[in-house]
Amino acid sequence: MTRTYLILLAAIVAEVIATTALARSESFTRLWPSLVAIFGYAVAFWLLSYPLQVMPTGVVYAIWSGMGIVLISGVAWIWYRQTLDFAAILGLAFILVGVLIVNLFSKSIPH
C-alpha cells in the first residue's frame, strides 16, 4: 500500500506543477509553460490510474484533489505572494482534515 500512496503523491505533485505552469501559460500563449502544463497533467493522470486499480475512485479523487488544492494554494502563497485570508486558511485546513479522516478512519481503503 505504501507504493500506491507514493504513486498518488507523485500524481499530486505532477498536478501541482502542471497547475502552476498553466497559470503562467497566459491561456496557452506562452510555449514553455503551456508544454509543462500539458505534460504535467498527462503524467498526473497516468500516475493517478495506478491507485485507481486498488483503491475506491472516490477516495483516490478525494485525496488527489484535496491535497492538490492545499499544495497549489501553498505554492501560490509562498512563490507568487498570493495572500490568503483567515477564511481561506480555515477552509484549506478543513480540506486537509477531511483527507486525514478518510485516510486514517475509512474502512473503504486497506490500512
Image (cartoon, rainbow, N blue to C red):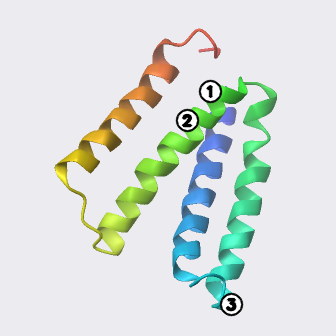
The kind of residue on which mark 1 rests is Val
Q: Which mark is residue 77?
A: none
Seen in the picture, residue 32 relative to 106 is either above or below; the reply is: below
Across and down, in percent, residue 41 comes to: 70, 62
Q: CA distance from mark 1 to mark 3?
A: 35 Å
- Is residue 2 visible in the rendered image? The answer is no
The kind of residue on which mark 3 rests is Leu
Which quadrant is the N terminus positioned in? top right
Q: Is residue 101 left or right of residue 81?
A: right
Across and down, in percent, residue 29 comes to: 65, 90
Sequence-wise first label, 1 or 3: 3
Q: Is residue 31 left or right of residue 84?
A: right
Seen in the picture, residue 89 relative to 93 is either above or below; the reply is: below
Q: CA distance from mark 1 to mark 2?
A: 6 Å
Sequence-wise first label, 2 or 3: 3
Q: Which mark is residue 63?
A: 2
Q: Which mark is residue 31?
A: 3
The kind of residue on which mark 2 rests is Ile
- At a point 48% along the width and 12% down the height, the residue shown is 105
Q: SS of the residue at dot 1?
A: helix
Across and down, in percent, residue 25 comes to: 59, 82
